[in-house]
Each structure stands twice: as structure tokens, then as C-alpha cells.
């Protein structure tokens, strides 16, 4: 689905990404780990077209998005990618429901009636039905993050990008969000998440560890493995 070929990203004289290459296949669930400042979030933004790259190429379904005009690229992000962030990016003057459906109204891919049905179904699945008319400041952090997933899913994306999606949540809310992501992946949704938490990364199928803007190592879990235990042993062995 996505092919990253020797991408580098520099800010002034600092190289944040250094010739990173890897692929994301349909149905993958990949976690990006690494110390603070390692470039893991920059990698997510660069490969999703949210940020430009200095050198290299990023291809989405065989099309080089690093050469796309911004108008075309923004349409690709709107229609085929979903985004969830640690600090929820929702409009304070809109209700939870209106925030969720806004991207669909902009995309105009479906009728207003179908958008409403899809939004209601997503909210029911995320167990936040009944919160439609709430202000974003009137719900818990876990509920707001689940609403963010609804919004990210509203246009039926091919891939979800998440940047520290559980960083501001307590353990209970974190597990709720992770269970949802795991279920979505089992149904075929492709997911890439950035996290510094092993508990979160262990829900993925593959973990890439980034140091100084490069992928230093990776691990792919066996089916049925105790992922938390296997990841902890791997991190210790690699001295990360």
C-alpha cells in the first residue's frame, strides 16, 4: 500500500530522517517506537503527506505522493487516510457529532443521509452513542479519543495513522482504544501508530524501532505469541 524509499528530512542543518526505507502492506498493523526526538513522528507525517520530505520518495498504491501538488495530496488524505493524534484536533464550537461528520461533508462522497447513518453506526461501535450533542469539553478523554477514531473512519479510509493516540489516557481508556484498533485491524484496516509505550506497541503485528532518524531494528510477532512478553525481551536484548 505504501512504499517508503530512502526518505530524508532535514530542518536547517539537522537531519531528522536519514534515508529511511520500508513498506506497509494492506492489513498491516505497524507500531513505530523510539526515544524522544528520534524522528518517529516526523516519519509518520512525512509518509502520510502531512509534511514534505527533503529527498527520497513515498508511493501510495504505486503513485508517488511526494511529487503531488498540495491540492491533490489534501484530497488523498481526506478520502483515503484517517488521522488520530494524542492532542485531539476537534473544533470547540461544534458538537461531538458535528465534528465526526465534518470530514464527510467536506469530501461529499456520500449523501447526507448515508453520512448520518455511518456516523451513528461508528458511535455505537465505539460505545459513545448518546454523546452526539455534547460539547467536546463535556466528555472524558477516552470518549473524546474514541470520537476521534469515529471521525478518522467517517470517509472509509484505507489506512489509519495514529500519533501517540493513548498518550493522554488512563489505563482503562487506553485498553478500550487499543481493543478498538485491534478489532479494526482484524477486519482488514491497515494501521500505523507512533508510540513510546510497549503496552501499546505490543498490540501491533510489527514494531519498527527508530533511532537518530533511521530504523535501527524491527520485530514481527508470531501469530498467537505473547506480544508484550516477546517485545519486552526484544527491547532488552537490543538494549533499547
Image: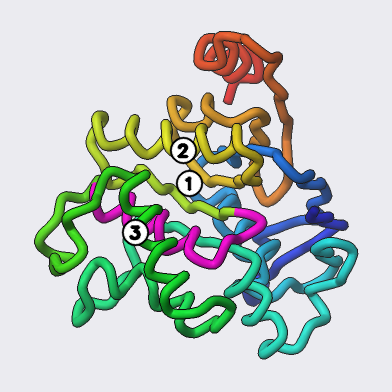
- Labels 1, 2: front one: 2
- Mark 3, residue position: 120
* Residue 57, horizontal then vertical, whole percent: 85, 66
User: Front-most of 120 and 154?
Assistant: 120
Mark 2: give few (<14), some (14-19) or many (20+) Cα within 10 Å. Answer: some
Q: Quadrant of the C terminus?
A: top right
- Mark 1, residue position: 36
Report the predominant secondary structure element of the magenta stretch.
helix
- Mark 2, residue position: 196
Q: Magenta span covers which residues? A: 143-159
User: Front-most of 11 and 44?
Assistant: 44
Please determine whether, in this image, residue 216 is positioned above or below residue 120. above
Q: Earlier in the sequence, mark 2 or mark 3?
A: 3
Within the image, what quadrant is residue 66 found in?
A: bottom right
User: Front-most of 201 and 142?
Assistant: 142
Residue 70 showing in the rendered view: yes
Residue 14 showing in the rendered view: no
Cα–Cα span, label 1 and label 3? 38 Å
Please determine whether, in this image, residue 123 is positioned above or below residue 217. below
Q: Earlier in the sequence, mark 1 or mark 3?
A: 1
Q: Is residue 152 highlighted in magenta? A: yes
- Labels 1, 3: front one: 3
- Labels 2, 3: front one: 3
Q: Residue furthest left?
A: 138
Q: Earlier in the sequence, mark 1 or mark 2?
A: 1
Under circle 1, the secondary element is loop
Under circle 3, the secondary element is helix
Mark 3: give few (<14), some (14-19) or many (20+) Cα within 10 Å. Answer: many
Q: Would you say the residues marked 1 and 2 are in contact, meaning their CB atoms lie under 8 Å apart?
A: yes
Q: How many marks?
A: 3
Q: Would you say the residues marked 2 and 3 are in contact, meaning their CB atoms lie under 8 Å apart?
A: no
Amino acid at each position: 500500500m505504501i512504499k517508503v524509499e530512502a526518505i530524508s528530512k532535514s530542518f536547517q542543518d539537522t537531519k531528522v530522517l536519514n534515508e529511511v526505507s520500508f513498506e506497509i502492506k494492506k492489513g498491516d498493523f505497524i507500531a513505530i517506537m523510539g526515544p524522544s526526538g528520534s524522528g518517529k513522528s516526523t516519519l509518520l507525517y512525512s509518509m502520510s503527506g502531512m509534511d514534505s520530505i527533503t529527498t527520497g520518495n513515498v508511493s501510495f498504491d504505486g503513485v508517488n505522493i511526494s511529487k503531488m501538488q498540495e491540492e491533490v495530496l489534501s484530497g488523498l488524505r481526506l478520502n483515503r487516510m484517517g488521522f488520530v493524534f494524542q492532542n485531539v484536533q476537534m473544533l470547540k464550537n461544534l458538537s461531538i457529532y458535528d465534528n465526526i461528520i465534518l470530514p464527510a461533508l467536506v469530501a461529499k462522497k456520500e449523501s447526507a443521509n448515508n453520512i448520518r447513518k455511518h456516523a451513528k453506526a461508528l458511535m455505537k461501535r465505539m460505545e459513545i452513542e448518546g454523546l452526539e450533542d455534547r460539547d467536546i469539553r463535556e466528555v472524558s478523554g477516552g470518549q473524546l479519543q474514541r470520537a476521534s477514531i469515529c471521525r478518522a473512519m467517517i470517509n472509509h479510509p484505507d489506512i489509519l495513522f495514529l500519533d501517540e493516540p493513548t498518550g493522554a489516557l488512563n489505563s482503562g481508556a487506553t485498553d478500550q482504544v487499543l481493543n478498538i484498533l485491534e478489532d479494526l485491524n482484524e477486519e482488514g484496516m491497515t494501521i500505523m501508530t507512533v508510540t513510546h509505550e510497549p503496552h501499546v506497541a505490543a498490540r501491533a503485528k510489527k514494531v519498527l524501532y527508530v533511532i537518530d532518524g533511521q530504523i535501527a531494528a524491527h520485530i514481527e510477532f508470531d501469530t498467537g505469541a505473547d506480544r508484550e512478553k516477546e517485545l519486552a525481551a526484544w527491547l532488552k536484548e537490543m538494549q533499547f
